Amino acid sequence: TVFDCRPYRYGNEEECHFGSAQGQYCIMIYGYNEYSTSLVIKTPDPIVTFCTSDSDCDDGIDCTEDTCDKEKGTCEFNANDSYCDDELFCNGVETCDASQGCQAGTSPCFDFGTTCDEDSQTCISCSIVENFDKKSGLRGTGGWSTEESTCFTGGFQIGRPTKVVSRGVVLQVNGDHTSGQGYALFTSPNTRVGRDDVDAGACVATSPTYDVTDPSLFGIWYFFGQRNNGDDSDDGFKLELLISNEDGQTTTELVTIGDTRHFARWTYASARIPGNSKIQVRVAATDGRKKGDFIEAGLDDMTICPTGISDPMSI
């Protein structure tokens, strides 16, 4: 027998989902010992298709025009993109999907090393970019210091991340952020789960010093993966921006993640930088003394761009 749905799960929590309520379906539930249950069939509220006026027609989608064809007595639902327009150049052109509603646009400034200026509605080139792709060899840190590290294994290096998964938790992403085929700065390349991951301390990397003449937006992509939840209060991740100028030195915490299960994926963080400043970036991934957890982290695609712009979230 060919089944349309066969969850094969213990207990009385099996579910089958079908895109349409019409038709015949063959399903099978697990024959759990000495159970009593009932079969509950849920269908979505029907959309009115017979009508005498526009008020009879409503598909629940905000960006469609719901009208009644009185001659046919049927409802018509037509997408209207203008209902989705947020009037922001840097967000791109939003569209309406007649079944799913408004869809986000794509920033017109999608090339790495550029960002979007909402005021002038133009793409601006960033003054400083770092994607680690031009660093020679898989080993080394490209001028980033790891002297503050106390970890036993898992120190930051330049290389190409490969996907690492443990107990369903993604600990390390598959590829760099720029293209998926380039380099990133991340905790030691792994040959398998648990080998050369962050262990017994903090793996720290601090960037070279960058001179920022004009008020700018700093942006960087990072990932962090941690398998266990709440097993060691010293576990976690921190990404900081050290800013020095005539007002002294300040530390801006871009990202702080405590001792919690965390799925690794490339994520964007940003901060404003005053003009005439010197900055450094510091990242720390920490695995406490308790054994058994797996932790990984990485950075890529750092940019420093003139201000008067929106965050470059296009890629």
Image (cartoon, grey):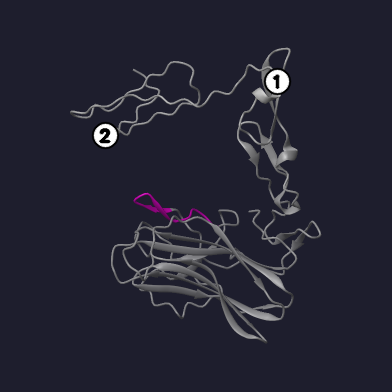
Identify the mark nearer the N-term, 2 or 1: 2
Question: In the depicted view, which residue is nearer to us: 208 or 313?
Answer: 313
Residue 158 horizontal side relative to residue 178, left or right: left
Which corner quadrant holds the N terminus?
top left
Q: Of tags 2 and 1, which is closer to the observer?
A: 1
Residue holding disc 1: 53
Q: Find residue 207 and name its label.
A: none
Q: Residue 155, located in which quarter of the rendered image?
A: bottom left
Residue holding disc 2: 11
Q: Residue 24, located in which quarter of the rendered image?
A: top left
Neighbour tally class for label 2: few under 14, some 14-19, many 20 plus, Cα within 10 Å: some
Residue 261 position in % (x across, y down): 39, 58
Range of the magenta residues? 164-176
**Residue at figure coordinates x 43%, y 29% from the top left:** 17
**Residue 130 shows in the view:** no
**Residue at figure coordinates x 36%, y 22% from the top left:** 27
Residue 277 horizontal side relative to residue 185, left or right: right
> Three-letter amino acid code at disc 2?
Gly
Across the whole image, how many numbered discs are drawn on residues?
A: 2
Query: CA separation, marks 2 and 1?
Result: 48 Å
Question: In the depicted view, which residue is nearer to us: 85 or 125?
Answer: 85
Residue 282 position in % (x across, y down): 53, 74
> Three-letter amino acid code at disc 1?
Ser
Neighbour tally class for label 1: few under 14, some 14-19, many 20 plus, Cα within 10 Å: some
Q: Is residue 171 magenta?
A: yes
Work out whether 251 lies above or below 173: below
Question: In the depicted view, which residue is nearer to us: 62 or 249?
Answer: 62
| Mark 2 touches mark 1? (CB < 8 Å) | no
Residue 109 position in % (x across, y down): 72, 54
